[in-house]
Amino acid sequence: MEKKRVATLTLDDGRSIELPIIKGELGPDVIDIRDLGKLGMFSYDPGFLSTASCSSAITFIDGDAGLLYYRGYPIEQLAEEADFLEVCQLLLNGELPNAEQKSGFEATIKQHTMVHDQLARFFSGFRRDAHPMAVMVGVVGALSAFYHDSLDINNPEHRAISAHRLIAKVPTIAAMAYKYNIGEPFMYPKNKLGYVENFMHMMFGTPCEEYVPNPVLVRALERIFILHADHEQNASTSTVRLAGSSGANPFACVSSGIAALWGPAHGGANEAVLKMLAEIGDVAHVADFMKGVKEKKYRLMGFGHRVYKNMDPRASVMRRTCYEVLEELNLSDDPMFKMAIELEKIALSDQYFIDRKLYPNVDFYSGIVLRALGIPTNMFTVIFALARTIGWISQWSEMIADAERRIGRPRQLYQGATKRDFVPIEQR
């Protein structure tokens, strides 16, 4: 029998407590601090940088080694070998599907791609120039007003139906948000098309003529979806879990995740890369810009990562995809791409950036790819939300089924005024 491991915390007043040490399948050990309350104390950890808020079996990240696994499968293998709906099944169910399971899942998703006709009227309540993410927050949250038949979160079948609906309908809603923004008619989904092809048809097709997706571009967008499908307990996923801990319905929870993703510190990184490149202006200015970065004059976007202290494992896949797309579209001489390559070259050879582990991350390349695909910058975060929906709903479903689930209630370190008596207004 394995000996129980503990960490002993001793206070300056002589009191002490033994806290269990929990070993994960991968990654560092964790000190279980749930009994700290017995000492009348709790921990202080702004940003939850050293706190595991849950136990999960979905995604593993080792930022020092540059590893990202979905259910144990390296992200590089999934991005090269799998399609997005296979990855959806993996994240939801824990295993890759066999041929029969895959076919059945694809058929189910296709049955749910259309949205309720009344939902389409919601769009007319938004200004045409509304940010598509504002539209996404509202319309995805409104799905719970239309699909009452699957809102019992304690029913596994209901949870599965809600997951299928979200995976199927979010691309439709995302494409509708784009079409509404540019003043073009909505395009209905086509069940004969694959998941990514169908989204591109709804985004770029018109009633005037048949839209035929380019397979190279389809595969590029599919990789973007796979690479962004889940990323452990990031800000938006933690938001979904926190909202879900109260018993809120899955549509409301995913809407809260979309709102959190909208923050520029989370979902707007690839858009920030393009803005940076536009400000640099020309490949001839890159060296001066990088010198300015070292002098703290400019911020270098798309390099380094909150989690990865080594190469972002998604970046190498996205880099190859970037080359493939630009070659397919005869854009290899694209000025922004040339600037990006020069930035990368300097960052990977200059000791200043090497010492600070400022390697290119997935956002450095994905913005260039999305731009080449014809997707406007205000839709970049929408694409991110579309891809991350499967991660959010998988994490939500796992949390609901967890026997240790409790409503989220973070504590605080209070540093405000101590008790004081009310003073009538005439005496102030």
Image (cartoon, rainbow, N blue to C red):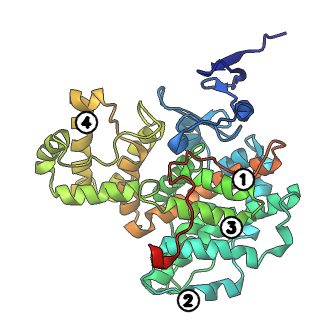
User: Which of the two labelled residues, at mark 1 and mark 4, occupies the earlier sequence position?
Assistant: 4
242 to the left or right of 347: right
Report if residue 133 is visible in the image. Answer: yes
- From the image, tell me which residue sits under label 3: 252
Circle nearer the viewer, 4 or 3: 3
- From the image, tell me which residue sits under label 2: 125
Identify the residue at horizontal 46%, vertical 54% (top origin).
266
Instruction: State the separation of the CA atoms marked 3 and 2.
Output: 19 Å
Dot 3: element: helix
User: Which of the two labelled residues, at mark 2 and mark 1, occupies the earlier sequence position?
Assistant: 2
Work out whether 116 lies above or below 331: below
Instruction: State the separation of the CA atoms marked 3 and 1.
Output: 11 Å
Label 1 is placed on what type of residue? Trp
User: Which of the two labelled residues, at mark 3 and mark 1, occupies the earlier sequence position?
Assistant: 3
Work out whether 119 lies above or below 212: below
Circle nearer the viewer, 2 or 4: 2
Front in this rendered view, residue 420 or 358: 420
Q: Which mark is residue 347?
A: 4
Dot 2: element: helix
Report if residue 194 is visible in the image. Answer: no
The image quadrant of residue 342 is: top left
- From the image, tell me which residue sits under label 1: 396
157 to the left or right of 355: right
Mark 4 neighbour class, 10 Å CA radius: few under 14, some 14 to 19, many 20 or more: many
Front in this rendered view, residue 268 or 175: 268
Label 3 is placed on what type of residue? Ala
Spot occupied by residue 330 in the image (x, y as percentages of width and height): 30, 58
